[in-house]
Image: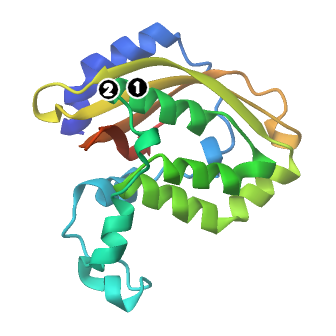
Amino acid sequence: MKRLASLLPGLLAAVALGGCATGQRSPVTPLGRPIAASSQHALGRSASTPAPAGDPPSERGGTVPPAALAAQQSVGAALLAATPQLALERYALVYVNWRAAQLPEHEQQLARMSIGAARLVAQQTAAGGGAAAALAANHVVNSGQVIAIAPGQGGDAGEWVVVTQEHTTGAGPYAGLPPGPHVTLAEVTHEPGGWVVSRWLPIS
């Protein structure tokens, strides 16, 4: 809560730019991902947290083989951005614009555009498949745009607030949903040649 409180000025300004939420929320978050702030925050913040018991033996206890770690920290030069804001905007536009029938390929695209925790989440979502199947059955499509990107202040310098305006359409429970703003906390990393998204945590 303290961390979110220090981001509040930028967050309020960003949401104000995007207008007020309607109060009616989509049955699922974008890409079918549940909002699990505590687990995803640990992915991005705590390198010493032990990995779950279900992980491969070589990765238990918070260790990752050097080759796997290097793969998680590399991205093609063409996908690097000149500024943090541009890296976040590019990633956000891909993240919010998708068709359920193409979600696995879409997640792989997000993985190629990111490193670290953001890439790992995209890869895990692509491998899951269950949520994508449920969304595809209802012909769900999500579209949106970036309406604000604000940097964290004080102790949260280096963290960013990204606000998108999104509209989810489809059949069944997805029919007639109104558009509305969504907020994501993100981080970027400077690599040789440019900036890349390294953490992406939707909070609304």
Nearer to me, 184 or 126: 126
Q: Which residue is mark 2?
A: 83
Number of residues whose C-alpha sits closer than 10 Å to that of mark 2, classed few (under 14), some (14–19) or many (20 or more): some
Residue 5 image point, x, y percent: 23, 29
Left or right of residue 138, residue 32 in this image: left
**Distance from Cα at disc 1 to Cα at disc 2:** 5 Å
Q: Describe the element under mark 2 as helix, strand or loop.
A: loop
How is the structure coloured here? rainbow
Residue at horizontal 59%, vertical 21%? 145
Residue 121 image point, x, y percent: 47, 58
Residue at horizontal 36%, vertical 56%? 74
Q: Tell me, for residue 66, which label it has, or none.
A: none
Left or right of residue 14, residue 44 in this image: left
Nearer to me, 84 or 149: 84
Amino acid beneath label 1: Leu
Q: Tell me, for residue 86, which label it has, or none.
A: 1
Pointers 1 and 2 in contact (C-beta within 8 Å)? yes
Number of marks in picture: 2
Quadrant assignment, res 120: bottom left
Amino acid beneath label 2: Thr
Number of residues whose C-alpha sits closer than 10 Å to that of mark 1, classed few (under 14), some (14–19) or many (20 or more): some
Is residue 23 visible to us here?
Answer: no
Is residue 21 depicted above or below 186 in this figure?
above
Residue 98 image point, x, y percent: 70, 39
